[in-house]
Image (cartoon, rainbow, N blue to C red):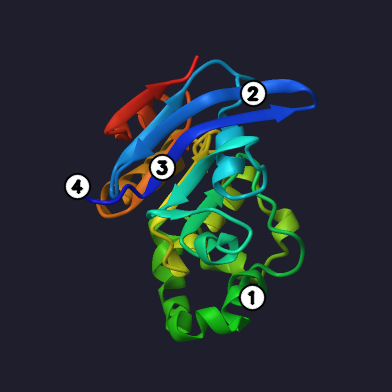
Amino acid sequence: MSTPAIEIQNITVRFKGKTIWKNFSMQVSTGEKVVLDGRSGIGKSTIFQCLMGFVAPEKGAVLINGRALTPESIWTLRTQVAYVPQEADLGSGQLNQWFEAPFAFKVNYSIRKNLDRLPELLDRFLLSTDLLDSDVSRLSGGEKQRMAIISAILLERKIFLLDEPTSAMDRVAGKAVLDFFRSIPDTTILAVSHDPAVLDLADRVVNVS
């Protein structure tokens, strides 16, 4: 049996004295598209926070590609995962500089040529290359989500955590995003969404109500 891309083992998460998750477990296989479905406020996004190491479970373990998420491994494992929140924060400055910034780090030197794919990907996601000269603060919520996804593709992330990925997009833009993910079967996706179009993308829907 192959190693799961994502494995959550009996985690318990408490926040401000409230138990958000108790003994929660799940696995996502490499290349699998899984959607978490459930009522708002139940804590679905907290699972993403745990997978990125922003929230530490009180007990249990989180593994990415078979390696436990720990203070020692967190930075390495984050280079394998893309987290696209519902409201993507791209900071400030020109968009082209924002795209280039991660490639200034030594770990990304070898894939800098991926920036050559930027015009192609912008077109694929129904975005104008003219936006590259714009300040990121002028982008709409849906444009920011798509830019965050494009950046992760350029950085060769193979695991995507998508929080309501189509919520700020119109139907046409949302379809472009979902069609792209259908075209890359080796990429693992764990999404939170109530959108029927996203649920249709899923190999499996996990109800966490």
Q: Secondary structure at mark 3?
A: strand
In primary-sequence order, the first of circles 1 and 2 is 2
Give how far across and how far down residue 181 sits, in percent.
33, 48
Q: Secondary structure at mark 2?
A: strand
Give how far across and how far down residue 47 sits, in percent.
56, 35
Q: CA distance from mark 1 to mark 2?
A: 35 Å
**Front label number (1 vs 3):** 3
Location of residue 203 (image quadrant): top left
Mark 4: amino acid: Met
Q: CA distance from mark 3 to mark 4?
A: 14 Å
Mark 1: amino acid: Ala
Residue 76 visible within the image: yes
Q: Secondary structure at mark 1?
A: helix
**Front label number (1 vs 2):** 2
Q: Which mark is residue 20?
A: 2
Horizontal side of 86 relative to 92 (left or right) equals left
Tell me the residue that label 4 is attached to.
1
Mark 3: amino acid: Glu
In primary-sequence order, the first of circles 1 and 3 is 3
Residue sitting at x 36%, y 50%: 5
Proximity of marks 1 and 2: CB atoms separated by less than 8 Å: no
Tell me the residue that label 3 is attached to.
7
Proximity of marks 2 and 3: CB atoms separated by less than 8 Å: no
Q: Which mark is residue 101?
A: 1
Q: CA distance from mark 2 to mark 4?
A: 31 Å
In primary-sequence order, the first of circles 3 and 4 is 4
In primary-sequence order, the first of circles 2 and 3 is 3
Identify whether 144 is placed above or below 172. below
Residue 146 visible within the image: no
